[in-house]
């Protein structure tokens, strides 16, 4: 399929995301046969020299719903947390049994936003994955639903899988869905909808195709899968969406013969530090810059100086990640600030030579140094 066959032989690390619809339903609970097939596919892949696989697994709440014989997905945050707490050990038990039969050890990692947003925790998590890979272990990842209120509210394991793919330096994110891939329209309502096989660039037209198609237990949709693919594309990672109901889905994708949608990455891959800034970190505040500063950042790859800052929004500290907006309110970049919001309010619009006199302390001349800065490509 297009350029993906040229890319496949170079794959050494894959993140596989499996949706709730494939793993559990409210009557029968966990789909053991599906987990068995995933385990077989993973065993085949990691048995190749130097190959690693991570599984980002939904299904904890779905398993809990079946165990408690509920009529549907709970609505309140405490109920969702309780049901997830009941379902998560059942889900891991199913994975452990399937992988144990093949002699493959697994590990459970429950992550929260802080594990990605805070640089120190992010590096620690990356080191943990590296150690698990050395031991030929398959990490099974889920959001820590019992404490991560924001994640439960958003229900977004698609973006979690993209963040994990970025963290571990994956070559491929494989999203196993209950549909074949991205269609030009909702195939359940329009029989003339066509499968989009390759996406070179995620435009507004592609985003328009991604109409949410929700289920009682799942809380994602094609929109969140597109968001995940965009995040991976910026990190130089290929994304594939295919139908996980096919027991050979993983093997077929890794052999290059499959039905699905491929999202190709950008050609230039960021450094690990800039990947974290651009694609994973959470912004603590915002600043608005004038057109001169915008051109310096986007066209000349310069550092951000205080003279170009028009407005400071939010409260943040030194070394926090902030969002940089143009005068129209569009994000043009993200970076690690050398000043707090209080200090920036005092020095905005000033020359670099005036900073130390205003703040009465030694200070850098740049608000965001170009080594700590990433710019955002505005899609049409």
Image: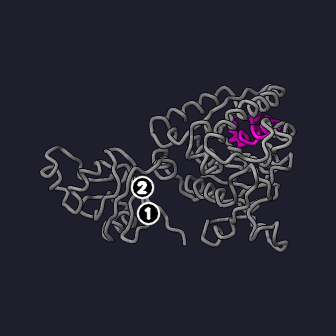
Picture coordinates of residue 68, whole percent (x, y): 78, 36
Picture coordinates of residue 33, whole percent (x, y): 87, 39
Marks 2 and 1: in contact by CB < 8 Å?
A: yes
**Which residue carries the number 2 mark?**
334
Which sits in the foreground, 85 or 261? 85
Picture coordinates of residue 109, whole percent (x, y): 63, 33
Residue 228 horizontal side relative to residue 324, left or right: right
Mark 1 Cα shell of 10 Å, populated few (<14), some (14-19), many (≥20)? some
Quadrant housing the C terminus: bottom right
Q: Is residue 363 above or below residue 380?
A: above
Q: Secondary structure at mark 2?
A: strand
Q: Secondary structure at mark 1?
A: strand
Q: Is residue 74 magenta?
A: no
**Residue at figure coordinates x 51%, y 51% from the top left:** 279
Residue 95 horizontal side relative to residue 286, left or right: right
Q: Magenta residues, as a range?
A: 39-66
Q: Is residue 58 magenta?
A: yes
**Residue at figure coordinates x 45%, y 40% from the top left:** 118
Mark 2 Cα shell of 10 Å, populated few (<14), some (14-19), many (≥20)? many
Distance from disc 1 to disc 2, alpha carbons, whole Å, reads 8 Å
Looking at the rendered structure, the number of numbered marks drawn on it comes to 2
Quadrant housing the N terminus: bottom right
**Residue at figure coordinates x 63%, y 29% from the top left:** 132
Q: How are the residues colored?
A: one colour
Picture coordinates of residue 36, whole percent (x, y): 84, 36
Residue 25 horizontal side relative to residue 144, left or right: right
Observer able to see residue 326? yes
Q: Which mark is residue 331?
A: 1
Observer able to see residue 373? no
**Residue at figure coordinates x 56%, y 43% from the top left:** 149
Q: Which mark is residue 168?
A: none
């Amino acid at each position: 399929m297009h350029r993906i066959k040229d890319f496949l032989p170079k794959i050494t690390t894959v993140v596989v995301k499996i949706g709730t619809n494939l793993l559990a339903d409210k009557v029968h609970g966990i789909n053991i046969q599906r987990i068995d097939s995933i385990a077989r596919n993973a065993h085949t892949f990691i048995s190749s020299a130097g190959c690693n696989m991570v599984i980002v697994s939904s299904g904890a709440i779905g398993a809990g719903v079946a165990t408690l014989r509920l009529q549907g997905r709970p609505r309140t945050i405490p109920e969702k947390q309780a049901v997830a707490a009941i379902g998560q050990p059942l889900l891991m038990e199913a994975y452990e049994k399937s992988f144990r039969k093949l002699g493959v050890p697994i590990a459970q990692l429950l992550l929260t936003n802080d594990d990605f947003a805070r640089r120190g925790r992010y590096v620690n998590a990356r080191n943990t994955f590296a150690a698990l890979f050395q031991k030929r272990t398959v990490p099974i990842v889920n959001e820590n639903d019992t404490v991560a209120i924001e994640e439960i509210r958003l229900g977004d394991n698609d973006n979690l899988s993209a963040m994990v793919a970025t963290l571990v330096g994956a070559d491929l994110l494989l999203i196993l869905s209950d549909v074949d891939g991205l269609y030009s329209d909702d195939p359940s309502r329009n029989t003339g909808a066509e499968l989009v096989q390759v996406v070179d660039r995620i435009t507004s037209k592609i985003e328009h195709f991604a109409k949410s198609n929700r289920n009682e237990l799942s809380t994602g949709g094609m929109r969140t899968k597109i968001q995940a693919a965009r995040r991976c594309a910026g990190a130089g990672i290929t994304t594939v969406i295919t139908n996980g109901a096919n027991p050979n889905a993983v093997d077929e994708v890794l052999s290059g013969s499959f039905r699905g949608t491929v999202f190709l990455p950008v050609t230039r891959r960021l450094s690990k530090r800039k990947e974290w800034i651009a694609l994973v970190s959470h912004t603590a505040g915002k600043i608005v810059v004038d057109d001169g500063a915008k051109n310096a950042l986007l066209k000349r790859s310069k550092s951000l100086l205080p003279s170009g800052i028009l407005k400071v929004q939010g409260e943040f500290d030194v070394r926090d990640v902030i969002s940089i907006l143009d005068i129209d309110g569009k994000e043009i970049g993200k970076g690690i600030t050398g000043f707090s919001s209080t200090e920036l309010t005092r020095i905005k619009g000033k020359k670099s030579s005036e900073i130390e006199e205003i703040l009465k302390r030694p200070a850098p001349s740049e608000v965001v140094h170009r080594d700590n800065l990433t710019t955002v490509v505005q899609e049409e």
